[in-house]
Amino acid sequence: MPALTLDRLLSSIGFGSRKEARALVRMGLVELNGEVLEDPFMELAERPANITVNGEEVPTVEKLYVMLHKPVDVECSHNARDHQSVFALLPDRFTAMGIQSVGRLDADSEGLILLSNQGDFIHKIESPKKGFLKRYRVTLARPFTEAQKAELLKGVMLKDERRPVLAREISEERVVLPDGREVDTVVITIGEGLYHQVRRMFAAVGNHVETLTRISVGPLELDATLGKGGWRFLTDEEVAAFL
Ligand code: URA
């Protein structure tokens, strides 16, 4: 393994090429433990937990595992066409480090989205074989009937799909909104991640999804302390629960 020089460390955490990283050091913008570092080729005996760049203390992890509370009108694409990109809600350096979303949520949907730059993590969660369940809370345009519930649990055929898809679980909940209003919501658990799957399933039984929030993926629940657009790193335990 080549020695961990300061320029190499900065480049590995998204601060550009090694040449660009060296320029940051020469401009006096890099500090460690409160001291400005002047030598871009300085060898670090070990990876520090954090480093300060341009006044901001950043962790030096190379493997990114992130949970984000996606708001509506945000697209899960690096080349968003009609809305803001979800990646614009994260530090730019994450894009330089190769971060991708794990699956997608529609622009009209909100809630838990995972992002990572680790291919094995992304593939594991996306793989239908692993069968990580996803839970969504929806509000509906029309009353939700027992007949609709029974049909969803039995399975519905969606256009252009080869097999019926079914709800693994469905429950109804009354939720108090931040403004004090109470609304009836339905929580549905599915195993696949087909295009617009939840909206299409409710449409197939004659209802219509008005709002859709993903509240969990596999063992991980949306962190209620994250406001819309907020994000945090996953803990080691949360990552291990998937792998
Ligand atoms: N199902 C949908 O219809 N939309 C999503 O964003 C996710 C699941």
Image (cartoon, rainbow, N blue to C red):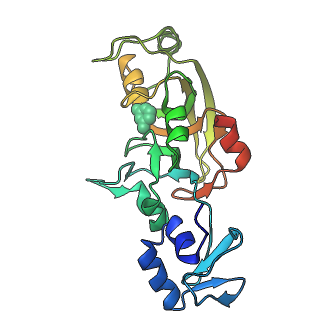
- In the rendered image, residue 66, in percent from the top left (x then y), is placed at 57, 52
Q: Quadrant of residue 215?
A: top right
| Whether residue 209 can be seen here | no
Which residue is pictured at 43% across the width and 58% down the height?
Answer: 87
- In the rendered image, residue 185, in percent from the top left (x then y), is placed at 56, 32
Tell which of 213 and 176 is nearer to you: 213
Residue 60 left/right relative to 203: right
- In the rendered image, residue 40, in percent from the top left (x then y), is placed at 54, 83
Tell which of 206 and 16 is nearer to you: 16
Residue 81 left/right relative to 150: left
Which residue is pictured at 53% across the width and 38% down the height?
Answer: 120
Quarter of the rendered structure image containing ligand 1: top left
Which residue is pictured at 62% across the width and 88% down the height?
Answer: 37
Q: Which quarter of the image is occupied by the N terminus?
A: bottom right
- In the rendered image, residue 82, in percent from the top left (x then y), is placed at 27, 53
| Whether residue 4 can be seen here | yes
Which residue is pictured at 44% across the width and 49% down the height?
Answer: 100
Residue 232 left/right relative to 8: right
Above or below for 50 versus 218: below
Q: Which quarter of the image is occupied by the C terminus?
A: top right
